[in-house]
Amino acid sequence: MKRIHILGRKNNGKTTLMVELVEHLTACGLRVGTIKHTHHAHELDTPGKDSHRHREAGACVSAILSRSMNAVFWPPEWPREEAPADGAYDRYAEFAPHFADCDLVLVEGDTTCAGTKIEVWRAVVGSEPMAPYDPQIKAIVSDDAIDLPIPRVPRSDIAAIAAKVLELAGV
């Protein structure tokens, strides 16, 4: 799975960039998958509905199949606190079969995993960039001048950002 993480602190424009990248790349004929990462614990299913009740009853995997959308719910193989200490476990590998037909997978977030990352940064937000502290960040997307030893791609140039994403992903 060719995967690039789009990172940025709160209100720097990660979601907006993700949407624009998906629109641009799919218009270019690529099959793009997306994953939204969150550090928060969320109930993804609707409590009280049948699929939720199936999981609560002990189903190891539960799915919803409908005319317009499908979903599969499964618990992570290793809860984060129990993951092997050597870092050999990649939670994204669990998603690989579902993204097998994708040319590229864009992940919004996840600063803690191993992988190629691009940071979105805006000076007006007032937070410092993460890139100086994370060697896995290979480019920064910003219209603001910034002195870093990695490429800066103008936020206003979606084609240039897409080209950098494809280059970094080896697509």
Image (cartoon, grey):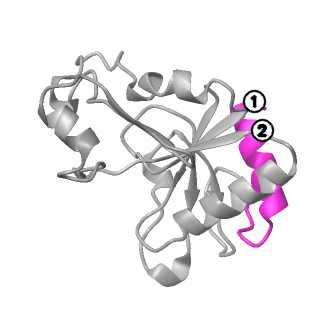
Check disc 1 and report its element: helix, strand or loop.
loop
Three-letter code, disc 1: Gly
Mark 1 highlights which residue? 170
Q: Position of residue 66 (x, y in %)?
A: 49, 43
What's drawn in magenta, residue-wise?
153-171
Mark 2 highlights which residue? 167
Which label was assigned to residue 99? none
Q: Main secondary structure of the magenta part?
A: helix
Residue 120, compared with residue 60, is above or below; it is below
Q: Residue at x 69, y 74 (%)?
A: 143
Three-letter code, disc 2: Glu
Residue 50 belongs to magenta span: no
Residue 36, compared with residue 114, is above or below; it is below
Point out the residue furthest to the left here: 57
How dense is the environment of label 1, judged by Cα within 10 Å: few (below 14), some, or many (20 and up)?
Answer: few
Quadrant for the C terminus, please: top right
